[in-house]
Image (spheres, rainbow, N blue to C red):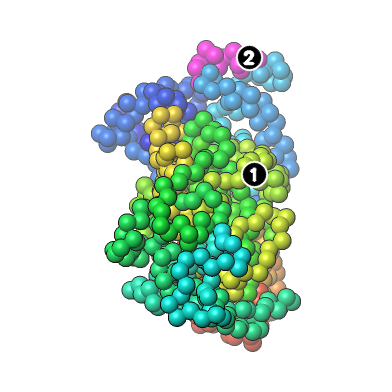
Amino acid sequence: MLLRNELLHYTQPVARTLRILWVDPRQRHAYLYDVAAQGTEVERWSLARIHADLAAGRASKAGSDPYLMLLGQQQPAAKHLALRDKAWQIIAPLVAQEPAIYEAQLRGALVAQATLQHGVSHPTVYRYLRRYWQRGQTPNALLPDYGNSGGRGKLRQATAGVKRGRPRKDGTADSAGVNVDEDIRRVIRVAVARYAATHARFSRQGAYRQMLADFFCSRQIDGETGRIVAVQAAPHDSLPSFGQFNYWLDYDDDRPAQVQRRANGAVAAMPARAPECRSAAAGEAGRARAEPAATMPASGAAAGRPGAAFGLTVLQAELQLVSRADALQTIGRPWLYVVTDAYSQLITGYYVGFGGVSRAHALLALAQCGASKVRYCAAHGREIAAADWPAQHLPASLKLAPELGTGGVFTPLLNNFNLPVCVALESPPAWQPVFERRFRLLPAAAQPAAGRLDGVLDLDEFQRLLLDAILYYNTRTMLDGATPVQRWQQGMASYGNALRTYPEHLLRCSLLPVAEALVSSAGIQLFNQRYTCMRAFDEGWFERARTRGPWMVRVAYDPADMETIYLLDAAAPMQYHACHLLDSSATQSLAQVEYALLPRTAERANSTLLRATTHNYASYVN
């Protein structure tokens, strides 16, 4: 598959590098540009010719793009931005007329019109076009080459009171049992997935007992500190039976892979089920009949072809997570930032954040769209094939949830990646019912309520639940007769795509939030945590701070993983010095919100607590 902006290296008949400027939606031809050219001659090649050259070894795809002009959160000088904006104002209407701008005769007429409208010369317009095509077709490609700096800091039903089914065999007047409603079914799904992830061999009795101990109890959480102060077991008559647990475990088809159905009686006769479109369970009264597999309508209009537009939705999960460092300390309710392709409804990326709706967290969800999903899932204990989650790209445009707004931190998306952003109020996403089979999701303005899932799961367990839900949705949920992965592949074959690819580490690093850290004799201090790096050790930063006083440096960080932060190097744009926690063996890798709730400990000497620094990370997705 050939993508817009990809670089092709040719070694014969002459060595040169060509950039793909545009691919015909009907997959017949593409326009290529020699990045070393001094003019604006664009070449039209058939896709069959390019594929033949790739297959024969005459051409190869470049692994990275050294011509891209990317900035971090810092902006270059105001005069540089003014020059860029002036140039972009001149050529933006021209480059929008695709494919006319790539044809020499039509291009000449368009350039002549621009020179009259803006009062500039023909060579000036052609120079802007050459820069734009050479450097990745983004507005930042038009930044001036003053010192090649590019700017400092370069760098997600039951009826009340009526018991359905037969009475319990040992039932008494005060122990009639409980109806399994949708809330209890959520608990069963979560408890099964949690037990399966932590045990090599799955035991139904073990999973059932752990579920009763962890989820069917009353937890009192202090409203000010978030501490779990009391846990009281639930009365026996409010507990689901082992038979009910087994039934609903077999009834759902989104079980972990190692959890097999029982092969007996009515259970064996149950059909494989697709996700339910209704929000509440039909109840145990439906045990005697087999319901047909349900399909879900695809929400939102298909935007022409895959990658034409991604939508970013933010919702709050109605459960409180606990710290991985202290199981009695809650860290709040997570916010989910989920990115979907408007055409196929495929989930292309996500991020889990805390502390309310955050634009910075939304950027990290977009960065995850360009990450290797195989590597990301493997880091969270899930082995997948590339075809199970094929998205590793940026779109042609991005639609945001209204609560995120536009501007501010989203500006670099346009300047770095030529990615326009707009606010779009759309219908609920197609993936929401699949997620709500595990936990409720609330809009930003809603008030959450206490539930059985509060105070049990930590962030790692929640991430595994999310990945299971995403993989199930992408590969097994039917939307208008096809799964999102199938719709994505069919759209690629029929209509081409509007996807863009960038080096994963550059994409992620340019979107990480940036903060000021203090260099002192105790280490590099950020959010009450102390870090060190090989550069600081080699250059004697801590000794210098002890004698001359502290100073500030700029670092990039991921709030979800604060074990490593990244020191920005003004002398080497897009190069990062990895800074690791001092005495990180005392705690596991934690999020910023978890570190903030840890008790303060006495500072330790840092002379023997260094780790190696790595430059040019191949991937920042851990």
The quarter of the picture where the N terminus appears is top left
Location of residue 20 by image quarter: top left
- Give percent across and percent down for residue 465: 48, 62
Left/right of residue 63 with respect to residue 561 in the rendered view: left
Image coords of residue 129 (percent x, y): 57, 27
Looking at the picture, does residue 591 appear above or below residue 102?
A: below
In-image side of 93 versus 65 (left or right): right
Which residue is painted at 67% across and 35% down in the image? 84
The x, y position of residue 201, in whole percent, is 33, 74
**Front residue of 490 and 99:** 490
Which residue is located at x 31 percent, y 34 percent? Answer: 54
- Residue 52's spot in the image, x, y percent? 28, 30
Look at the image and give the residue range highlighted in magenta.
Answer: 102-113
Instruction: In this rendered view, identify the residue nearer to me: 37 or 3.
Output: 3
Label 2 environment density (alpha carbons within 10 Å; few <14, some 14–19, many ≥20): some
Q: Earlier in the sequence, mark 2 or mark 1?
A: 2
Mark 1, Cα crowd under 10 Å, few <14 / some 14-19 / many 20+, is many
Q: Residue at left 71%, top 61%?
A: 447
- Which residue lies most toward the front here? 173
Q: Amino acid at mark 1?
A: Leu
Judge left or right: residue 302 versus residue 548. Answer: left
Q: Is residue 278 above or below residue 546?
A: above
Is residue 591 visible to the viewer in this orientation of the structure?
no
The circle drawn on residue 112 is 2
User: Regarding mark 2 in the picture, which secondary structure is present there?
Assistant: helix
Amino acid tagged 2: Ala
Tell me, for residue 400, which label it has, or none.
1
Tell me which residue sits at (35%, 56%) in the image: 270
Q: Quadrant of residue 216?
A: bottom right
Residue 451's disc number: none
Spatial CA span between label 2 and label 1: 37 Å
Q: Is residue 311 visible?
A: yes
